[in-house]
Amino acid sequence: MPRIVVTRSIPEPALELLRTAGEVDEFGAERAMTPDELREAVRGADAVVTAIPDRIDDAVAEAAGPQLRVVSTIAVGYDNLDVPALAARGVEVTNTPGVLVEATADITWGLLLSVTRRLGEGERLLRARQPWAFSLSFMLGTGLQDKTLGIVGLGHIGQAVARRGRAFGMEIAYSGRRRVDDDVESELDARFMELPELLEYADVVSLHCPLTPETRHLIDDAALRRMRSTAILVNTSRGPVVDEDALANALGRDEIAGAALDVFEDEPRVHPGLLDRDDVALAPHLGSATVETRTEMAMLAARNVVGVLGGDGPVTPIR
Ligand code: DGY
């Protein structure tokens, strides 16, 4: 009977599906397992179901043993997996693209509206029982209609964010490694720009690229200096895409008008220079955190394991 190690607590339907393919050991960790805990947990595993931020590298695969056949992460981003090292051992590596697109686009917009319409700031004021009164000049925010939404990485999530942007009356610009298909460009009425031009042009810059060596600190001091002083930076991709020191400094110098962040460079730590600012909206990595989406993600991760162990192959392999 194959041994399937699940590092996290996952929805019961996904566990049930996994049990059709092997004996399941659910560790149910609600935090990142330490490297020692991980190596111990995976010993003898044929399949490992994991999630960010467990780091699954060659040492973990070595600890598992030569029978390891699949590492299935419950996430679309997989910067926590050493894919080349796992592939070199013949281990299939899978993720869960597609199913979290709409949930992540929703949280992107929630955060963007939170910062532009000062929702967090307003709520903090009320909860602090501060005096307030309606007035025509009280807590004015910034409207988004007729402004430009600049998307960095117009993949599935970027497109879903852009579609919502169109519904809010925004113009769409995007940058990325390559242009998207003409039909996507025309559906969104999206203009391609190189990143420096996009940073100078957009009123909102929203990041939807994966974390790779090329995108680490893509938004650094120089990039922030290119942005408009009225612009908002939104990050629901991966924290290290933004240099947080540079971001805190740029906000402190009023070089940009605000930021909306769901992800952080060194999660779960949040840069202290961002914590006390009213021009920053924060969420604790909630992009895909709905019951429906997390269930679909876990089910897809389980189908990947069942496919590999059953010989049909993975549904959504990382190649
Ligand atoms: C992902 O899937 O990469 C998300 O960040 C998890 O919420």
Image (cartoon, helix red, strand yellow):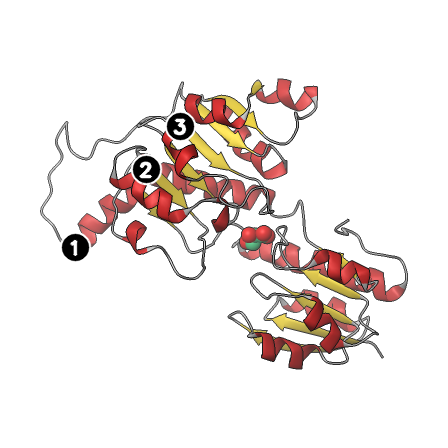
- Crowd band around label 3 with a 10 angstrom C-alpha radius: few (<14), some (14–19), many (20+): some
Q: Is residue 76 left or right of residue 174?
A: right
In the rendered view, would you say 65 is above or below 269? Answer: below
The residue type indicated by label 2 comes to Gly
Answer with the quarter of the image where residue 154 lies. top right
- Crowd band around label 1 with a 10 angstrom C-alpha radius: few (<14), some (14–19), many (20+): few
Q: Residue at x 56, y 28 (%)?
A: 175
Label at residue 128: 1
Name the residue carrying label 3: 226
Residue 92 percent location from the top left of the image: 80, 59
Q: Which one is earlier in the sequence, the residue at label 3 or at label 2?
A: 3
Name the residue carrying label 2: 258
Q: Is residue 283 visible?
A: yes
Q: Which one is earlier in the sequence, the residue at label 3 or at label 1?
A: 1
The answer to whether the residue labelled 3 contacts the one labelled 1, judged by CB atoms less than 8 Å apart, is no
Q: Residue at x 63, y 72 (%)?
A: 7
Residue 209 percent location from the top left of the image: 57, 40
Dot 1 falls on a residue whose secondary structure is loop
Q: Residue at x 48, y 22 (%)?
A: 197
The residue type indicated by label 3 comes to Arg
In the rendered view, would you say 243 is above or below 69? Answer: above
Residue 231 percent location from the top left of the image: 36, 29
Q: Which one is closest to the eye, mark 2 or mark 1? A: 2
